[in-house]
Amino acid sequence: MSLGAGGYMKRILSLILCIAVSISLFSLTGCGAATSRGAQIGIVTDVGELMDKGFNQGTYEGVKAYAEANGKTFKYYQPANGNNASDNDRVAAMRQAINNGAEIICINGFLQAAAIETVASEFPDVKIIFVDGWVMKDHPNVTAITYKEHESSYLAGYAAVKEGYTKLGGTFGGGGSHPPCNRFGYGFVQGADAAAREMNKQITINYSYKFGDTFSASSELQTQIAGWYSQGCEVVFCAGGSMFDSVKSAAAEYPNAKIIGVDVDQSKESDRVITSATKGLKESIVRVLTDYYAGKWDSSLSLKEQNLGAAENAVGLPTDTWSLKNFTVEEYQDLFNKIKNGIIVPKSDVPENGNNAAWLEKGLTNTTIRFE
Amino acid sequence: MNNMAFLIQKTLIYSIPLLIVAMAGMISERSGIINIALDGMMIFGSFLGAEVVYMLQDAGILSGNPQVVFLLAMLAAAVAGALFSLLLAFSAINLKADQTIGGTALNLLAPAAAHFFIKVLYMQDKLVMPKDIGFVILNENIPEFMKPFFDKAYISTYIAIFIFVVLSIILYKTRFGLRLRACGEHPQAADSVGINVYKMRYIGVMLSGALGGLGGYIYIATVAGGTCNADVAGTGFLALAIMIFGNWKPGGIVVGSLLFGLLKCLSSTYTSLDLNGDGIAILKDLPLPMYFYNIVPYIVVLIVLILTSKNSRAPKAEGIPYDKGAR
């Protein structure tokens, strides 16, 4: 019987342990539920970093702005392997977002298309906003936001030449096969040429996709751009995420070197930024999220593409922070309204592979393209 | 600005980190320890240097003296490199471990550690400086021929050249230098006349680590635009190749790093390079793809190494752990 007493003790102990374990399990699942409720909006980023001062950051800030104003919670996910992320890495990031309770995911960058197809059919109840993408006819849970980048950069190119610059440069990401970057480049060239024609001047534009394949900064890019500046190039338009850092460093070497930023207002990043060809990432994402939470998914978002341009006030130059002196805000507004009302229509027919000068030079009268 | 001056200027900027790091490798190998961890030491040093700059700039300390910040960062990078190299010294000298494997371990450790700390501390993949470091001299109004050295120059360039000269003198003109070299050629003989081989080798490796770390930060600050992403694009290995090309001698190392710096510079500027000023970029008009120019520096190093390998003369005792009992 003395053994029996020990047996009781053991049973009581094991009972206590059982209770303790089950309580901790419950509290753990409680925790899990709380966090899953805690990330209703997911963001899956494109190549480059989250805080790239451009594309990813604009998307992030849009979600953040909406979530904070409306009491929603959000979380961002970066696919593994950074710039070499595979479709599997992207799918994994999206699944992770959904497992954490995301009901709508904001995914930017056309590179993620294949991963979106997979996830959209796997989770038909989760809504996906595909920024810089397209609608997928088999997936009613996907909506797309695209921008008329060529309108934004048309304004920037026009403004730069009207300001008095005649030696321009442009470096673009994606190696010539990234449609938004190509549209940025195309519009820039057209805008600059239009202004040169009005002023009856000849201008040159250095145009390059070199060293921009992965949208990242590199010493090679910095040296290349420094070379342009040393040859008298006055202002360089940089459309490619973190590539901006290289252009900024190159400009720092030359007292008069200027930069035109992209995607978001980059005037805070460097005092050399004279203006930025922006697209309203933040505003358009807030808009789509507002529609979604107002219950308008089926009526206005599903299977529909939001192609936003000057007409929607989704592209343009931030006039408050620009440092242009000869080109006035009135002139800008005038040009902006012409684009908005369709009086001027910048061309946007970019080729699949734009890594050559032929398509850019079509229809230019006062511009020499130096393609590298 | 004149194209030639631009080319020389940029060549110098690419060459200086290579020069310093190749010297780092030379010092270590001359003392008898193979140091293939140059890349790792650069990365570790560059991370600590960038960290110091970030903290100082973030806190607004010394904001009026960017050059002082730069100097402090270089010092921090050198100290970090020296401490990091203790790992190699301990394993290679005290534990008599294989030096190549020890060095490889350091090369694997450094980028991982730097990435880890950047992620943990800043939630980023890379550490971007809040402000530019800036040039020590920015002078547009000097005669053309002086521009390569006195316009848009970094303070690190002068310091690196100074260190190079001092080290060369120490190595060849002082008693310490002779002893260090003796430990790399015939440590038993050195020991027999009362030189502490372990101590000399420790000094060699730590000097090497300090220079490696310094070179790493200089690379980050001047070539990579001040951003630390736990990567120096294989500069440490290139420096190793340049050291071999230079036959473990300072003079050869200078030639090697200038040659490579020039080719590297050409590969990113050839499209707009117009040396004689007639408005025609000669290299661009050649029917070669851009990738050709990108690989040229590496191909040339390979070819030069093949051609010079017959005459290459490594320190005799390098790679062999010193064992007192085997005398």
Image: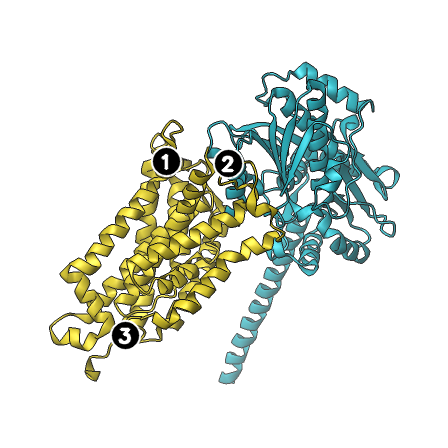
Chain colours: A cyan, B yellow
Of pointers 2 and 1, the one earlier in the residue sequence: 1
Question: Mark 3 sits on what residue?
Answer: B316
Amino acid bearing label 2: Gly
Q: Residues within 10 Å of mark 3 (few under 14, many from 20)?
A: some
- The mark closer to the camera, 3 or 1, is 1
- Say left or right for B249 vs A259: left
Q: Alpha carbon of mark 2 to alpha carbon of mark 3: how far?
A: 50 Å
Q: Which mark is residue B145?
A: 1
Q: Chain of mark 2?
A: B
Residue A265 picture quarter:
top right
Q: Alpha carbon of mark 2 to alpha carbon of mark 1: how far?
A: 15 Å
Amino acid bearing label 1: Phe
Does dot 1 land on a helix, a strand or a loop? Answer: helix
Q: Chain of mark 3?
A: B
| Residue occupying image coordinates x 37% and y 35% | B145
Asked whether A111 or A101 is in front, the reply is A111
- Say left or right for A168 vs B322: right
Does dot 3 land on a helix, a strand or a loop? Answer: loop
Q: Residues within 10 Å of mark 1 (few under 14, many from 20)?
A: few
- Say left or right for A252 vs B86: right
Question: Mark 2 sits on what residue?
Answer: B277
Residue A45 position within the rendered picture, expressed as x and y whole percent measured from the top left: 65, 47
